[in-house]
Amino acid sequence: MKTLSEYKIPYTGLKTGFHHFDFKLEEKFFSNFEFSQIHSAEIAVKVRLEKQSTMLVIDAELTGTILTECDRCGDDCTVNIKGSNRLIVKFGDHTDRIDDDILVLGPSEHQVDLSEYLYEFAHLALPLRKVHKNLADCNQEVLEKLNHFLVEEDDDENIEEEEV
């Protein structure tokens, strides 16, 4: 994966306190990641960076829409996403990713690359079930074929466990 320079924040020149950054995540951004589940998107990211003497606290708020495949019918559908995540950046002897949300930057680093984190944050914001808002928007032909495989439960039938 190549890094995307517009998602790097140089922190060495920033004063202690809060700083705000805005990013857009679109098709061009996600095409840089080989296994992305998101291909077409319009996501706005608002980043609030708090620079402290010993670390950076980065809060990211994501809102937008993605074009994905409907889990119900397989056709394209637009899904709204919203999420918030935090990244803690500490300063240490060498650069290392300690945890999913803790990064240590060595003394030779002068900027934090958010591209991989924004990619992960966008995927974490995806709903578990991606479907059309209205059932009528689904491909009716596919739904009709799926109904042929529907297993109906018989409410009157009691299933008893066999005793050994």
Image: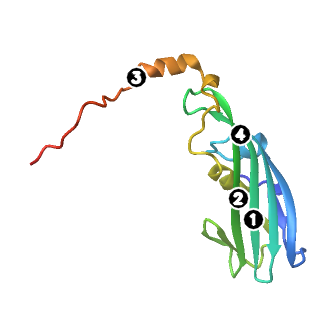
Sequence-first disc among 3 and 4: 4
Q: Position of residue 150 (x, y in %)?
A: 40, 25
| Distance from Cα at disc 1 to Cα at disc 3 | 46 Å
SS at circle 2: strand
Are the residues flagged by discs 2 and 3 in contact, CB closer than 8 Å? no
Sequence-first disc among 1 and 4: 1
Residue 78 horizontal side relative to residue 71, left or right: right
Asked which quadrant contains residue 87, the reply is bottom right
Q: Which mark, by number, is residue 59?
A: 1
Is there any visible trace of residue 96 in the rendered image?
yes
SS at circle 4: strand
| Distance from Cα at disc 1 to Cα at disc 2 | 7 Å
Q: Which mark, by number, is residue 84?
A: 2
Reading the image, the residue beneath label 3 is 149
Name which residue type carries label 2: Ser
Sequence-first disc among 4 and 2: 4
Sequence-first disc among 1 and 3: 1
Sequence-first disc among 2 and 3: 2
Q: Is residue 63 above or below residue 55?
A: above
Are the residues flagged by discs 3 and 4 in contact, CB closer than 8 Å? no
Q: Position of residue 23 (x, y in %)?
A: 83, 53
Reading the image, the residue beneath label 4 is 66
Q: Label 4 neighbourhood size at 10 Å, few (<14), some (14-19), many (20+)? A: many
Name which residue type carries label 4: Ile
